[in-house]
Image (tube, rainbow, N blue to C red):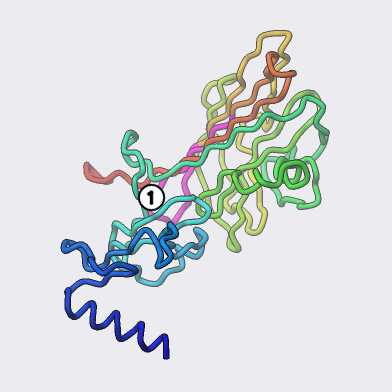
Amino acid sequence: MIKNIIIIGVIISSSAYSQVGINTQNPDPSANLTVSPVDLNNNAKGTLLSAMTTIQRAAISSPAQGLIVYDSELKCLMSNNGTPTAPIWECIGGSNATPGLTYFKQFHYALPSGISYNSGSFSAQSGIINNTDQSLLSNWLRTNDPSQLTELPMIDGIRVDIVFKAGDTYRPLIINTNATGKNLFGLTKADISGTFNWNMPSVFAANGGYLNIDNDRLLGWDNPNVNNNIETSISVFRVLGDNGSLYRVTFWGYTDSTNGNKHQIHILLEKFDPQKGGVHN
């Protein structure tokens, strides 16, 4: 009975005002829907839109132009600024400082200098992740700081990680968490050796396939008693068969002698949509 009364009330309100108001008798005349910031008990409330993972968002069939969802992995409201047949999902309120930059995720962590290393794993350019390998940063966080685990950058199911190695070094990885393999190609640039072009594997394996994206497959924290240098690796690649989007992963590693010789790691994952306008080849 109560539900029926509420429904009838909404119908009468919308008929009388040509707008719909939730918890308000005075919907804004410029809007077809006005939601009050408080409930009937005057408690502050927000409006919760559909929250979903990136993969779920991509699986929406023929999304309407202007459709809005919340991407729980990218942590932003996204709207389809394309068409139902060719959707272009973009974060609402994102920066336009870099043309074509759709979204990015940054991660920074100060790791203890006495962290446990692994001297042998992930020495190959590519392979399959062994989820029991505790030398992975993701596994270390799961044990020591699980609240940060979800902050590791991931876009379109492509996640970044590192594996700790003896000698104050680490291996920078990108990992495919998708249930299907991906075909990649691109280039890697490392400051210590200039630009290095190399052939990526034809298939970036599904469900934990990894790719070590540094040209010598190894980065260092650097000895703080020597120079406090920052060692960097930058990789740019794209997924074959998509719309031409570019991905860029940047790793920075250094030891902070002013902060207990902690190993500082910065990771930035960016995605650039195809150029909008201009000449297309």
Circle 1 sits on which residue?
Answer: 91
* Residue nearest the viewer, comparing 89 with 191: 89
Q: Residue furthest front?
A: 41
* Residue nearest the viewer, comparing 55 with 86: 55
* Residue nearest the viewer, comparing 163 with 225: 225
Q: Is residue 4 left or right of residue 114?
A: left
Q: How many marks?
A: 1
How far from the left and from the top, in percent, is residue 216? Answer: 66, 29
How far from the left and from the top, in percent, is residue 279? Answer: 23, 42
What residue range appears in magenta? Answer: 236-251
Residue at 50% in and 65% down:
56
Magenta stretch: helix, strand or loop mostly: strand
Q: Residue furthest bottom?
A: 1
1 relative to 67, above or below: below
How far from the left and from the top, in percent, is residue 58? Answer: 45, 63
How far from the left and from the top, in percent, is residue 253? Answer: 64, 25
Q: Is residue 215 left or right of residue 22?
A: right
Magenta segment includes 242: yes
